[in-house]
Image (spheres, helix red, strand yellow):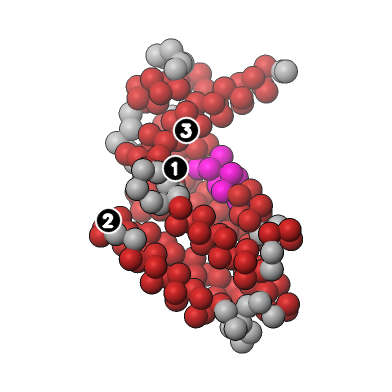
Amino acid sequence: MSVEEKHNAARKRIVEAARSIVGERGFSAVGISQILEVASIPKGSFYHYFDSKEAFGEELLRIYMADYLQKMDALFSPDAGNAADQLFAYFRFWQETHVDGKTGDKCLIVKLAAEVSDLSERMRRILDSGTAQAIDRIASTIAKGQQEGSVRRGLEPQVLAGALYQLWLGATLMVKITHRSQPFEKTLRASEQLLLP
């Protein structure tokens, strides 16, 4: 393994170790010393791997979005049933990552979007690109479902995908506010009405 590969592997280990604490507390509330502690690296090493906390945040979001899109690809794979089955598997995955006891595993898009979009233009762009790619995957699956008949026809796939993604984002915020799962239940019913023939 080259020096650069070792450096990149160490960066990724730091990010992955710190991901749950950032997911639980938010980006601004977690200090560099906490990142070092949870990643078990010596004090003073942070700036060997990252130019700034913002650079760490960018890497955190890049890795998170790559992992998230890879999970979507697995859920939307041809062997995962028809397109409607794939879409509802994705919605179940969304729900399951936001139930009680999964604090550190929760979606960083939901947790950090408002916070970092105001703090860092570069971090905002990573989120913007990642969510656009997620919506594109949903739209492709909707289009496939419309062709095969498992998804209702008549609505533009890209528009419907964007609306569904925003609906689930909003439901997630309401779950955080109410501490109840009812917003997800309503959003799932609305998704069924929008998608199923």
Given contact means CB atoms under 8 Å apart, are the residues at marks 1 and 2 in contact?
A: no
In the image, residue 60 above or below residue 47: below
Label 1: which secondary element: helix
Q: Between marks 2 and 3, how big is the CA–CA gap?
A: 30 Å
Residue hosting label 2: 179
Is any atom of residue 196 visible in this view? yes
Relative depth, front residue between 76 and 57: 76
Residue 106 as seen in the image, left or right of residue 82? left
Label 3: which secondary element: helix
Q: Quadrant of the N terminus?
A: top right
List x then y, in percent, for residue 176: 30, 55
Residue 130 colored magenta?
no
In the image, residue 191 above or below residue 48: below
List x then y, in percent, for residue 196: 57, 79
Residue hosting label 3: 56
The residue lying at 38 percent from left, 20 percent from top is 37
**Kind of residue at disc 1:** Asp
The residue lying at 39 percent from left, 64 percent from top is 184
Residue 37: mark: none
Is any atom of residue 116 visible in this view? no
Tell which circle, 3 or 1, labels the residue nearer the N-terminal end. Answer: 3
**Kind of residue at disc 2:** His
Main secondary structure type of the part rendered in magenta: helix
Tell which circle, 2 or 3, labels the residue nearer the N-terminal end. Answer: 3
* Count of marks placed on residues: 3
Residue hosting label 1: 105
The magenta-colored residue range is 61-69
List x then y, in percent, for residue 110: 41, 53
